[in-house]
Amino acid sequence: MKKEIKDIIIIGAGPSGMVAAGYLQKQNASLLVLEKQKFPRFSIGESLIPRCMENFEEAGLLPAIKKEGFQKKFGARFIRGKDVADFDFSKKFGNGWDWTWQVPRADFDKVLADEISSKGVNIQFETEVKSLEYQNGIWKITAIDRSGYESQFFTRFIIDSSGNGRVLARKLELEAPPKIYDHSSIFTHIEETDRPLGKEGEQISFEVLNTETWFWYIPFSNGTSSIGFVGPNEWFDRFKGTNEVLFRKMLQETNYYKGRFDNYEFRFEPVKLQNISRNVNYIHGKGFALTGNSAEFLDPVFSSGVAFATESGLLAAKLAYRELNGEKVDWEQEYSAYINKGVNVFSTYVKEWYSGKLQEIFFHPYPNEQIKEQICAVLAGYVWDNSNPFVRKHSRILDNIYKLIQSEKTV
């Protein structure tokens, strides 16, 4: 049995793990990455938001990503019947990046992993964590590779970036009730050979079918497009048949996009994810930190997943490195409180989207430009900027504006 000792082991080679690894590699840290799957592999979470860009840059990944020519994303469009709410990231409140990308995650994640590997970081693909044991400040990880060969790894700190694999959440029984209940998703890709030119064939769009149900369209620069639905489980239960049959039935429920994708074959049978929201009781403990989806996943409506993954991955790497070098780290304040602050802001927006309040604000026929700029900054991922009242007073301010809109209707 092979045994290895590292200061830090990262579980998962997705964006969160690769941002963490990129930072630690620049510090010449002793690290290892364990990844269950072989890359390229399919993953959801194909739409980024601008906050990610700073994290990729600090981890040294931005030049490699830029070379690939992924579809640039300059904003997002929301459609409800004849109403359209268009958000342009260059017109957001405050500083920060005003564009990002929308990406086929199989290709994107491989670019990140290849770049990290090229810098000398050992990523052991097709290696699954089977058991964990913590004793006297050291983790013992037992893992098995694709040939069935078992290895043991010893480390002072684990950064769990396993995403939907949720390795530590499951093995340490950290799972908690989700913040968003009873929502599911189904999605696939098409090769869009007759894609409209210009913005119509480049911009990510969300079409509202009803208050709790929506459809996404995400075009990629390689001609592939991602299409999918999110909604309550009871809406999904209306459709019967194979995933392909029910997905085509769902397409007939759209208004703006109805008929556009009828003649395309699906590149793979639509994938259905039941009860997509995830949560944990806590995101750090002795010798470990959870990042990205391995900790919490809210909802895909505002594309926040990769932003939180990279934000938490980078921060966990910084704090773990400091701690292992003898500094005192207050994980509760410096990590959990910080990450949860951003999660709470986005949680408010997601909940008020599904309550319908935020939709009323989005689709107001005469939007206040200052309000729109401040909301746009939140959609861009700048959810830690307290100079923005839509961050600082996120819950109260949305409710107040909704009440104001309702009062206008009664005048």
Image: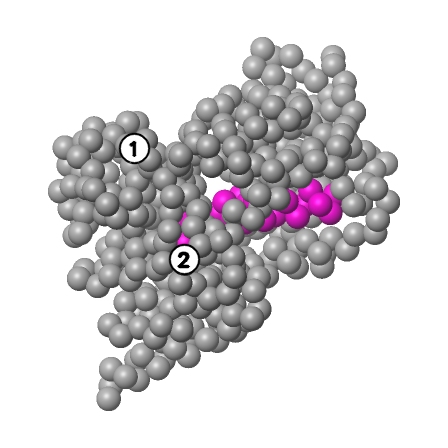
Quadrant where the N terminus sits is top right
Point out the tag, 1 or 2, that comes first from the N-terminus. Answer: 2
Q: Position of 118 compared to 381: left or right?
A: right
**Tag 2: amino acid:** Phe
* Label 1: few (<14), some (14–19) or many (≥20) C-alpha neighbours in 10 Å: some
The residue range painted magenta reads 292-320
Which residue lies most toward the bottom here? 411
In the rendered image, residue 318 lying in the magenta stretch gets the answer: yes
In the rendered image, residue 311 lying in the magenta stretch gets the answer: yes
Q: Nearer the viewer, mark 1 or mark 2?
A: 2
Of the pair 378 and 4, the residue shown nearer to us: 378
Rendered residue at 19%/41% (across/down): 196
Residue tagged by mark 2?
89
102 w.r.t. 388: above or below = above
Q: Position of 25 compared to 264: left or right?
A: right
**Tag 1: amino acid:** Thr
Rendered residue at 49%/59% (across/down): 346
Q: Are marks 1 and 2 in contact (CB under 8 Å)?
A: no
Residue 107 screen position, x and y as percent: 43, 29
Mark pair 1, 2: CA separation: 24 Å
Residue 57 screen position, x and y as percent: 57, 43
Residue 102 screen position, x and y as percent: 39, 42
Disc 1 secondary structure class:
strand
Rendered residue at 50%/45% (across/down): 306
Residue 111 screen position, x and y as percent: 50, 29
Of the pair 90 and 120, the residue shown nearer to us: 90
Task: Name which quarter of the figure residue 82 lies in.
Answer: bottom left
Q: Main secondary structure of the magenta part?
A: helix
Res 373 seen here: yes
Residue tagged by mark 1?
224
